[in-house]
Amino acid sequence: MTSLIIGLCAGMLCMVSFLPQLIKIVRTKQTKDLSLITFSVLSVGVFLWLIYGILIGELPIILSNAFIFVLSLLIVAMKIKYK
C-alpha cells in the first residue's frame, strides 16, 4: 500500500510539472524556445512507460504516463502549429 501511495504521489508531481509549460504555450502561442526533438522523444519514452505499466498492471505508472503522454503530445502539436 505504501508503494502505491508513493507511486501515485510521484506520478502526480510529474503530471503537474507539465502544466505550467502547457498553460504558457496556450496563453502566449509561442514555442520558439522549445525543442521539437526533445518533446517528441519524451513523448515516445512516456508512451513506452505507459505500455510497460499496462503490461505489469501498475496503476501509478499507467495513470501518470497516460496523462503525461497526452500533455507532451499537446505540446508537440502546439510546437508544430505555432512554428
Image (cartoon, rainbow, N blue to C red):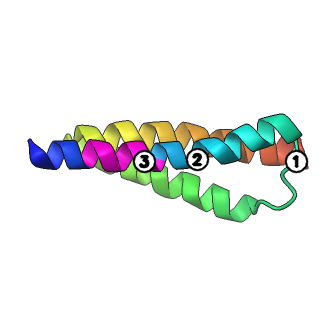
In the image, residue 9 lies in the stretch drawn in magenta: yes
Residue indicated by mark 3? 13
Q: Secondary structure at mark 1?
A: loop
Q: Residues within 10 Å of mark 1 (few under 14, many from 20)?
A: some
Q: Residues within 10 Å of mark 2 (few under 14, many from 20)?
A: some
Residue 56 seen in this snapshot = no
Asked whether the beta carbons under mark 3 and mark 2 sit within 8 Å of each other, the answer is no
Residue indicated by mark 1? 30
Q: CA distance from mark 2 to mark 1?
A: 16 Å
Query: If you read the primary sequence from the N terminus, does the residue marked by circle 3 or circle 2 appear first?
Result: 3
Tell me where residue 56 appears, x and y as whole percent.
Answer: 19, 46
Q: Secondary structure at mark 3?
A: helix
Using the rendered view, name the quadrant where residue 59 is placed.
top left
Residues in magenta?
7-14
Say left or right for 78 vs 44. Answer: right
Residue indicated by mark 2? 18
